[in-house]
Amino acid sequence: MGQDSRLGRRRQGPSPCRARDRPGGCGGEEARGRGVMKRSFVDARIEIMLAACERHGVNLPPFALWREQDYRAAPEAAGRIAEGGLGWNVVEFSPGAFTREGLSVFTLRMGDWRELGKGRGRLYS
């Protein structure tokens, strides 16, 4: 039976996979399908990161948990979030090798490179 994740999406089966649970960890073709990360794979990585943040007392901004309908309900804020390059990034540097060469990051703030020429910009990574 499925359960609701913190992201508000329906998840089937047990909690997100753990690398130690099976050969190949959470990555690989079977988890992603046809060389493209599935939404369920990305959601599982985000769930793992949310659990780590909770464990370590890291408070993320409310939009870290926004679902599609939240973005649609707040188009102005959504535009600023997108323009600022903020939010979740789940990257696999080599296809099928997430556990070896993957990265999950939440970008909290990003400077506006267009302001650099005016002496006001600042870039963050």
Image (cartoon, rainbow, N blue to C red):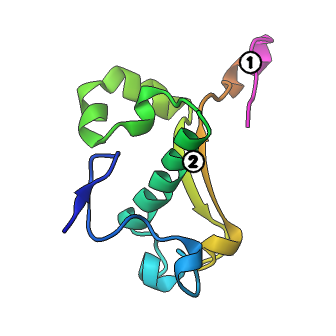
| Mark 1 lies on residue | 121
On whether residue 120 falls in the magenta region, the answer is yes
Position of the N terminus, as image quadrant, is bottom left
| Mark 2 lies on residue | 52
Q: Is residue 35 above or below residue 85?
A: below
Q: Is residue 109 above or below residue 12?
A: above
Q: Secondary structure at mark 2?
A: helix
Q: Tag 2: Cα neighbours inside 10 Å, few (<14), some, or many (≥20)?
A: few
- What residue is rendered at 28% in x and 42% in y? 68
Q: Is residue 34 above or below residue 38?
A: below
Q: Secondary structure at mark 1?
A: loop
Most extreme residue toward the bottom is: 23
Magenta residues (range):
116-125
Between tags 1 and 2, which lies in front? Answer: 2
State the image coordinates of residue 87 (x, y, percent, origin top left): 51, 39
State the image coordinates of residue 23 (x, y, percent, origin top left): 58, 87
Query: Viewer-proximal residue, 118 or 125?
Result: 125
Type of residue at label 1?
Gly
Mark 1 / mark 2, whichever is N-terminal: 2
Q: Is residue 111 above or below residue 30?
A: above
